[in-house]
Amino acid sequence: MLIFVLQTIWLFIKELAGKDLDLVVVLKFLLYYSPKLIPLVLPLTILLASIMVFGSFAENYEFAAMKSTGTSLQRAMAGLGIFIGILGITTFFFSNSVIPWGEYNSYNLRNNIKKLKPAMAIAEGQFNDVGNINIKVEEKSGLNGKDLKGVVIHEKSNSAKGNKNYRTIVSKTGELVGDENSSVLKLILHDGYFYDDTPPSDYKAREKNPLVKSSFKTYTFNLDLSEENSQDLDEKNISDKYSMLNVSDLNYTIDSLAVESKKEYDVFAENLYNRSQIAVLNTGLIPKKETTFTGDILDLFDTKKKIQLLDLAINTTNSTKQVITTKEKFLNNKQTNYNKHVVALHEKFALGFACIILFFVGAPLGALIRKGGIGLPMVIAILLFLTYHFIGIFAKNSASNGSVNPVIAPWISTIVMLPLGIFLTQRATADRGLFEFDHIIEPLKKLFKTKAKSKTEIAKTTENSLIKPENLDKAKSIYKNYTFHSNTAFTFYITGLILTILFFVFNNNKLPNFATASIQLSIISFVMLLIYYIKSFLNLHALYALIDKKANLKKPIELLLGWVVYPLTYFLKRNKITEDFSNTLK
């Protein structure tokens, strides 16, 4: 939770910084925003905790002690299973009450903060809305950033022609002058130009595209910020966002949207029917069959009439197509809004089930890998959670545009994890390994005629791989460095892999700062991987130099080639070399 809260601060630092907010308002913002983090935090927490706890039990032979007293894995999981079930039900009520409350308050608080003291929110290198102008400055300096350099201003014109930027002001320098007790901010510009391309009311004059350009030594703006600076941070104006509604409100809103959508389609269909003018055709006409003319009906008209008729048909068709295209965008937006409400409704139910399913994934997985603590369980939990999270994001995004049924979308990630939970629970209950490849490996062994080394063969290998007594301590030291460097290389490999995956997660969630940091750290990890890989290779080469040439061991070059498919080939070869060297040293 702390990690995600820190991410929230980083994500909204631009909105919170420079607003002269007191600590209470910032803490209130974090309090309101924290509930919506629960759908991310809780599944990951349950998955990680269950892997760590049951992995620790298995690592310390607690399950062996339980089984010796007749306690099965299901019985050992029963207490936590009941707790997770209660937690799942509690999570539903939490997502139905607390999350909409937090979303409602955080959204309104953010909206109010944006309007608070905009004079302090002029950020360098980007356009900022301040009063009725849009201002960009290259550099701020002086006390409280009052001295500006490289000012570009677009002045908004609230006229009958619309809220457009017809006036542009560019100046080399500027100065902000204001008083804490005054709601008027004075902006003084120096040495600049004034451009005005406001279209005149006369149509013929507008065709000439007139432009007024003038220079100035000093130009002063007086901006009235009374409305912005008097903003009440506790004011609640927005309450109709789908994420702010509980199950009852969502059911009512979904029903209303469905009725409204049907009404829109009916009205649109009626309009298209009326545009076709079928309703006003003279249906009383009785056509008579003409036996003397069998050609095209257009041949009855002269060329001028043909052109007029075809032009009328084309214009009518194009007009109708334009109406359909415009209406299609409007109806698609309404359908997207409807789909988001449906997804929000089912998310409240899916979250509780996700907690239960992920527990039955994590608990047996911990019992199978027999590893507790933070290391390996953390890696596995993050990879599983990213898989769960990725599937959920893609499904919900697809449901918004109608590619996936919005009822099914929130459940897809849970449905994908359900077979994995059943599979792992069955394997752990039967006390079988995580994966069994004997039915694949044995035929391959027979195919390539490879047999495991017997103790006699190992002894024969060690006899031919002698280390001189004076080199024994040195060999042990080099061997120790080799194992350290190879393990460190593997750690950097896993770190770089996770950071690369996080890059795509942050990039998909429109967090460019985090995405950039992740890819940069992953590059650093892979560079360190290369460094330690080379060190391990050099240690290995030094070991070979100390061993008699009759040593029947893998060549160092074979280990170097493992870089191509790093983790699998390299570590299979490394384990083989480690085993041979251990026998040699013994």
Image (cartoon, rainbow, N blue to C red):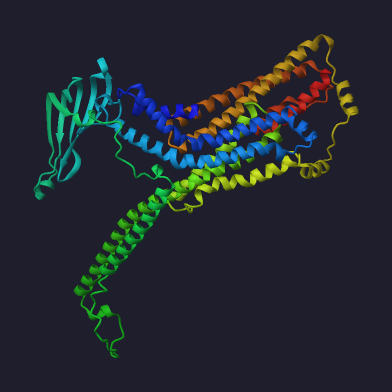
Q: Is residue 450 left or right of residue 230?
A: right
Residue lying farthest to the bottom in this orientation = 291
Which residue is depicted at the point 68% across and 27% down? 560
- Report if residue 364 is visible in the image: no
Comparing 410 with 240, the one in front is: 240
Which residue is depicted at the point 74% across and 33% down? 63
Up-down: is 413 above or below 560?
A: below
Q: How many marks?
A: 0
Q: Position of residue 313 (x, y in %)?
A: 26, 69
Q: Quadrant of residue 268?
A: bottom left
Residue lying farthest to the top in this orientation = 470
Up-down: is 471 above or below 399?
A: above
Q: Is residue 545 left or right of residue 86?
A: right
Up-down: is 41 above or below 217?
A: below
Comparing 171 with 61, the one in front is: 61
Quadrant position of the C terminus in the picture = top right
- Report if residue 260 is visible in the image: yes
Which residue is depicted at the point 29% across and 67% down? 270
Q: Position of residue 34 (x, y in %)?
A: 44, 32
